C-alpha cells in the first residue's frame, strides 16, 4: 500500500476543522496510519520547505507554517498520493473543484488549509521528516 503525508495547516487547525478533514480522508478510503499535532519551529519549516527556498513566497510560507500548530498525518491506501491530491484540490482555492478541501475551507492561495506530498518519493522524505518508523502503524 502506498503512503503519503498530509499536513493540516495552521489556518485549518485554527478553524477547528481537523476532524472534518481527517474524516474526508477516511471516507475516500485512505487509512490514517499516524497523526500528530505539533508546532513547527522556524528552522523546521525552512528545512521542510527547502525545495522552495529560492521562490519569492518562501519566507511568507515559513512564517505562515509557524503561526500556529499543524496536524501531520500519514495516509495509506491504493494510489494514496494521487487520491490525497485530488481530495485537496488546486493550490489556489479559487481554482479548486467544488467539494475539495481547499474549495471548502481555504481562504487564499497562501492560507490553503492543507499540504500533500506530490510524489511517492517525496512522500517518503516528508513522512520521515515528521514521523519515526515506530510511530506509523
Image (cartoon, grey):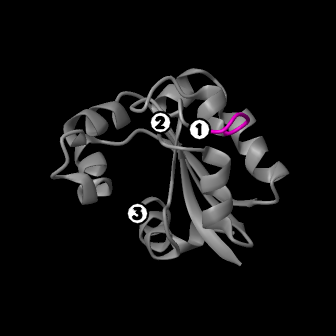
Quarter where residue 48 is shown:
bottom left
Helix, strand or loop for disc 1: loop
Helix, strand or loop for disc 2: loop
- Work out how far the residue at label 3 is from the one at label 2, CA to CA, in angstroms: 25 Å
Helix, strand or loop for disc 3: helix
Residue 28 in the image, given as x and y percentages of width and height: 80, 54
Which residue is rendered at x = 33% and y = 34% of the image? 66
Q: Is residue 98 magenta?
A: yes
Which residue lies most toward the left here? 54
How many circles with numbers are drawn on the protein?
3
Above or below 104: residue 131:
below
Residue 74 in the image, given as x and y percentages of width and height: 61, 60
Which residue is identified by label 1?
A: 96
Above or below 134: residue 25:
above
Residue 53 in the image, given as x and y percentages of width and height: 19, 52
Which residue is rendered at x = 52% and y = 74% of the image? 120
Q: Tag 3: Cα neighbours inside 10 Å, few (<14), some, or many (≥20)?
A: few
- The stretch of residues the image draws in magenta is 96-100
Q: Tag 2: Cα neighbours inside 10 Å, few (<14), some, or many (≥20)?
A: some
Which residue is identified by label 3?
A: 129
Using residue 17 as the reference point, say whether residue 66 is left or right of it. left
Asked if the residues shown at circle 3 and circle 2 are in contact, with their CB atoms under 8 angstroms apart, the answer is: no
Tag on residue 92?
Answer: 2
Which residue is rendered at x = 58% and y = 72% of the image? 134
Above or below 67: residue 88:
below
- Work out how far the residue at label 1 is from the one at label 3, CA to CA, in angstroms: 28 Å
- Work out how far the residue at label 2 is from the one at label 1, CA to CA, in angstroms: 7 Å
- In front: label 1 or label 3: 1
Amino acid at each position: 500500500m502506498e503512503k503519503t503525508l498530509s499536513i493540516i495547516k495552521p489556518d485549518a487547525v485554527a478553524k477547528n476543522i481537523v476532524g472534518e478533514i481527517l474524516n474526508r480522508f477516511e471516507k475516500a478510503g485512505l487509512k490514517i496510519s499516524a497523526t500528530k499535532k505539533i508546532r513547527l519551529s522556524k528552522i523546521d519549516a525552512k528545512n521542510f520547505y527547502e525545495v522552495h527556498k529560492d521562490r519569492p513566497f518562501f519566507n511568507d510560507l515559513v512564517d505562515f507554517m509557524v503561526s500556529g500548530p499543524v496536524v501531520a498525518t500519514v495516509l495509506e491506501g491504493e494510489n494514496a498520493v494521487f487520491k490525497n491530491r485530488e481530495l485537496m484540490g488546486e493550490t489556489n482555492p479559487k481554482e479548486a473543484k467544488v467539494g475539495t478541501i481547499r474549495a471548502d475551507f481555504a481562504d487564499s492561495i497562501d492560507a490553503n488549509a492543507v499540504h500533500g506530498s506530490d510524489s511517492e518519493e517525496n512522500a517518503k522524505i516528508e513522512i520521515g521528516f515528521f514521523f519515526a518508523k515506530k510511530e506509523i502503524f
